[in-house]
């Protein structure tokens, strides 16, 4: 089913990403920050998808660890790679916004530091899977579950500790003119995540088939 | 004794009057020499529109950089994914030919 849906979904996502800058340009300006606030339309959806990717990786890893399903391991590996990709977008767009809004590139406060730790956890997962040798799949699954458990702490860190970062109450109180472009970008990022997850999982499936083929050739 | 009390009382009242008069004259002049009272926010920050142009940080390059980073990161990832996938497909085709087995790619779709 995913094979049939892949091409139309990829085209829809590409069209959404092409149209997003127009919607963002037409969105109203925020009164205190002005133009720089428009980073919000990519930064926050990328961050929400970053959390979603970490969550998918953690759930798939738990399914692999307790159910021994190789397909779940492939999904986990694909989701971990996307977590790192989305984390790069969040961790670069955030400081660019902060430089103008706060006057600094980075602050070691709870939200920023915990986001960096989450990103490093999934970076560690990928390094473990690549260089860990036999058994790294199960060890990696443990790391991914740990990373998934970090997601709620990162999300609510702005409520528990005093930080420079805005609180989670920003989204429900968003001005009506900003809601449309924001949710449009959220859907575009989630769509991108689904498309890339399907493509990356497919790559792992083909690699597994190739491995079987090598074993068959060597056995002849 | 009564005379003495009267003299001391008069001197005390005169001294008090002098203090009041001096206070009245000195108070405005002291206040005039003090810096104007400001709020805490004004002490630490200067409104951005009062800054000279060379001290203002332009928002547009930062905004363009943020969106460019997102686009470039996604493009590089898609390109790397496509490259890895085509390498695996090529390897499968080569291996399939070597073992005499047809490529199973078409059969799975």
Image (spheres, coloured by chain):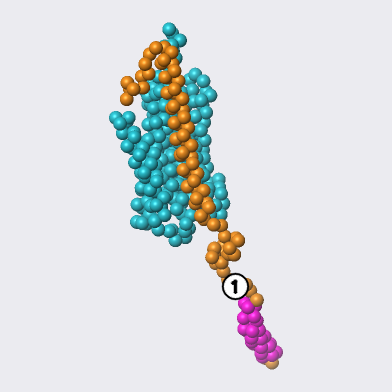
Element type where label 1 sits in the image: loop
Looking at this view, name the residue that lies furthest to the top. A220
Quadrant where the N terminus of chain B lies?
A: bottom right
Q: Is residue B60 above or below residue B48?
A: above
B105 vs B50, left or right, is left
Looking at this view, name the residue that lies furthest to the bottom. B3
Quarter of image, res B53? bottom right
Q: Chain of mark 1?
A: B
Q: Which chain is orange?
A: B
- Measuring 40% from the left and 19% from the top, which residue is drawn there? A209
Q: Is residue B27 magenta?
A: yes
Quarter of image, res A82? top left
Q: Position of residue A101 (x, y in %)?
A: 51, 55
Q: Please state the extent of the stretch shown in magenta in the rendering.
A: B4-32
- Measuring 50% from the left and 50% from the top, which residue is drawn there? B64
Residue A116 seen in this snapshot: yes
B35 vs B66, left or right, is right
- Measuring 39% from the left and 33% from the top, which residue is drawn there? A197
Q: Position of residue A196 (x, y in %)?
A: 40, 34
Q: Is residue A98 above or below residue B7?
A: above
Q: Position of residue B70 (x, y in %)?
A: 47, 43
Question: Circle 1 sits on which residue?
Answer: B36
Q: Is residue A107 magenta?
A: no
Q: Nearer the viewer, residue A220 or A163?
A: A220
* Callout count: 1
């Amino acid at each position: 089913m995913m094979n049939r849906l892949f091409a139309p979904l990829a085209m829809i996502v590409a069209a959404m990403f092409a149209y997003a800058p127009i919607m963002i340009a037409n969105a109203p300006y925020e009164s205190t920050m002005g133009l720089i606030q428009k980073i919000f339309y990519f930064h926050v959806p990328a961050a929400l998808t970053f959390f979603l990717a970490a969550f998918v990786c953690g759930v798939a890893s738990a399914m692999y660890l307790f159910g021994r399903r190789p397909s779940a391991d492939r999904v986990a590996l694909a989701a971990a790679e996307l977590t790192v990709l989305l984390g790069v977008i969040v961790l670069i767009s955030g400081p660019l916004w902060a430089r103008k809004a706060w006057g600094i590139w980075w602050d070691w406060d709870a939200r920023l530091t915990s986001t960096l730790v989450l990103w490093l956890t999934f970076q560690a997962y990928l390094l473990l899977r690549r260089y860990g040798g036999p058994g790294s799949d199960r060890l990696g699954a443990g790391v991914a579950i740990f990373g998934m458990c970090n997601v709620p702490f990162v999300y609510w860190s702005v409520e528990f500790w005093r930080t420079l970062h805005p609180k989670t109450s920003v989204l429900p109180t968003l001005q009506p003119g900003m809601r449309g472009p924001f949710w449009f970008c959220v859907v575009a990022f989630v769509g991108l995540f689904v498309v890339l997850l399907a493509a990356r999982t497919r790559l792992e499936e083909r690699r597994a088939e190739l491995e079987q083929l090598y074993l068959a050739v060597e056995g002849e | 004794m009564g005379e003495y009390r009267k003299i001391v009382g008069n001197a005390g009242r005169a001294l008090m009057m002098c203090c009041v008069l001096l206070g009245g004259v000195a108070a405005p002049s002291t206040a005039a020499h003090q810096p104007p009272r400001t709020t805490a926010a004004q002490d630490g920050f200067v409104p951005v529109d009062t800054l000279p142009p060379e001290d203002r940080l332009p928002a547009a390059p930062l905004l363009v950089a943020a969106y460019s980073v997102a686009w470039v990161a996604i493009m590089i990832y898609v390109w790397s994914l496509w490259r890895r996938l085509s390498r695996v497909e090529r390897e499968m085709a080569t291996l399939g030919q070597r073992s005499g087995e047809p490529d199973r790619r078409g059969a799975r779709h």
